[in-house]
Image (tube, helix red, strand yellow):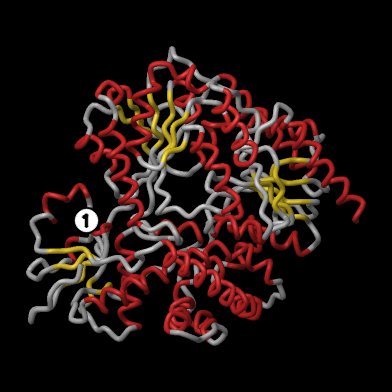
Amino acid sequence: MTIASTTEPFFLATTAQEAFWDTEKRIVFLGEWCRLFSRKEYWQTLDATVAQSPYQTLAAVEHYYACASEICEELLTALTEALNEIHGTSHSLRFWRIVIGPWLFYYVHTNLDRFVRIKDVFAQHPDLTTVALSEQSFVVPRDTMEAVDLCKTDLFNLQLYSRVFTFLGHDFPTVEAPELPQAAKQTSKEKLTTRLFLLKAANFAVKKACTAIKDRPGILYKSSYFSPDVELQLFLRTRGKFRPVGRKPVRGAVGPTDSTLRGRLASYLPAGDDFRAFLQQVVPLDLPRCFLEGFRELADEASQYPLNPTAVFSSNAYFYDEAFKVWAGASAEKGALLLGSQHGGNYGVAKCLKPQEHEAAICDRYYSWGWHDDGHPVVTPFPAAKLTGRRTIGADNSKKRILLASTASFRYLVQFPFLPEYFDDYLAWQQLFCATLDEGRRKDLSVRLLAEDLGWDLKHRWRAAFPEVYLEEEGASANFSDSLAACRLFIADHVSTTYIEALSANKPTVMFFNRERYSVRGEAQRNLDLLRKAGILHDTPQQAAQVVNEVYADVEIWWNQPERQRARQEFCNVFGRTSHDSVSLWSREFLSIFNAGLKAR
């Protein structure tokens, strides 16, 4: 809501860095990300309000998504010319789309959001004052992964906002960044069973053996999303035609930036409206070092990869593995096929999903988990790589726990349409679901939290609201497959990979998500309606909780009813396809591509 004007200007808090807030003034928080749950007792005492979001409808969000996509294409064309000139290369637009595309779309989405929010809040409150980050504290990311990781932090977001302030002509006092220790990253560790040890040993032997046939034609993969045992089976069934690339990821340059090189970029970038003019100023400052100062290092590492692949296959190395991307792009220019595979449950369901569009754009063949895309004929429905070799679980009344696999979103937007405001709503729906459960069912509830909290204080929120709920932290307990097998009932409160894993395993599942916050592709709506009609998918958390209360006592009878199973099977055939013959289907597919490649040479 808009605050009535006074003679005293309001202070705009753009981040959760409390040391930079002026609490002597009334505060306007730019968004909920400023108000950490762990600091609730403090900020509740302040004379403050939260700025109205500039995104009041899904249509508005989709508008900015479309704008960002258009700008990405303009910038990609300009940067292709610029980087080829600077590096003395003649790579294609596709090559640079493969190499810089993931960074570019995250960067444009991120900066468009910051630009829109700052313009909007100053339209609401023209007399705002705030602080900016000193340019001496600005950082340039080394690569795509660091660029995205930095977007999780308050200081880097203050840097982004500060660039907008300067462009819009606001001259605010500046602050230096404090020296803060790097937070250790939490990683999920697999329990090393005897079987897993033997599989790892066998795959290690395969990688060693592959060095002897490194430059022979083959379908070479990295980050396949197949399990280690399936990778081994595919290697054996194709007689080594499908084999791993044994190179470790290279993060890119860590040295200083070259202002002369960066100055040359600006003249290539398109002008236009105010946001395009803003990007013309900031892209040369923010382009990750691995694409400019460190590109030679990436090219040298890429030259160590196999010389003549028939095809390159990956599920997610196309995003953050910079040397791999350079090699894949160069291989495509020499005639190799690029093969991609779906790696998330949003794919094929979400109406607006930039990673899906990017992967389909760079690949010659892209394997979905069962769905088609009329706009991208390269999309090929196939058994899901991640689910290949998975066993069916089924309904079992002897199990006790109710498993809810929670998620966490960035506190600051990194891609439309996934707004921080929507995650606030998501947390509220979780609380409504839990509050509607019978007391006994709440005590049976086990909430699986991601290892990385992203600043939402999810553990503290759960313990404050429902201390009786058991919290299962990823990385500190069993992997998801084991947790799924051990529960009686699975709860899916968002669209992601976990609900696909549950449904494909025939685990009794109750779903809900906010349709006003998540646009669905038209092709996916029919299948979701099947789940809704079958009583699996629900439109509110209260409805979902009531179903849990009703069916928990005998999930076997409820889940195994023919109409419910038909809906599940039909849905999975399109969005989580499996087959008892998946390994054979994949091996035949790879051999067919290999043989076609030999004939073409």
Residue depicted at 65% across the width and 81% down the height: 85
Residue found 60% across the figure and 24% down from its top: 391
Measuring from the top left, give residue 122's x and y in whole percent.
Answer: 26, 78
Q: Residue 445 appears at what percent x and percent y?
A: 33, 26
x 28%, y 57%: residue:
33
Q: Is residue 512 above or below residue 138?
A: above
Q: Is residue 327 visible?
A: no
Outermost residue on the top side: it is 398
Q: Which residue sits furthest right?
A: 599
Residue 68 is left or right of residue 166, and the answer is right
From the viewer's perspective, is residue 535 above or below residue 219?
above
Q: Residue at x 12, y 75 (%)?
A: 4
Question: With 248 as the anchor, is 455 left or right in this view?
Answer: left
How far across and how far down the image is residue 57, in percent? 38, 63
Q: Is residue 202 above or below residue 285?
A: above
Residue 92 position within the rendered picture, expressed as x and y whole percent measured from the top left: 71, 71
Provide the secondary structure element on which disc 1 rests. loop
All told, the count of numbered labels is 1
Q: Amino acid at mark 1?
A: Arg
Q: Residues within 10 Å of mark 1 (few under 14, many from 20)?
A: many
Task: Residue 428: name its quadrant.
Answer: top left
Residue labelled with disc 1: 35
Above/below status of 288 relative to 43: below
Image-based side of 18 in relation to 370, left or right: left
Quarter of the image where the N terminus is located: bottom left
Q: Is residue 460 left or right of residue 60?
A: left
Q: Quadrant of the C terminus?
A: bottom right
Closer to the camera in the image, 8 or 491? 491
Let me know if residue 493 appears in the view: yes
Q: Nearer the viewer, residue 481 or 600?
A: 481
Depth order, front residue of 293/321: 321
Examine the image and state in which quarter residue 422 appears: bottom left
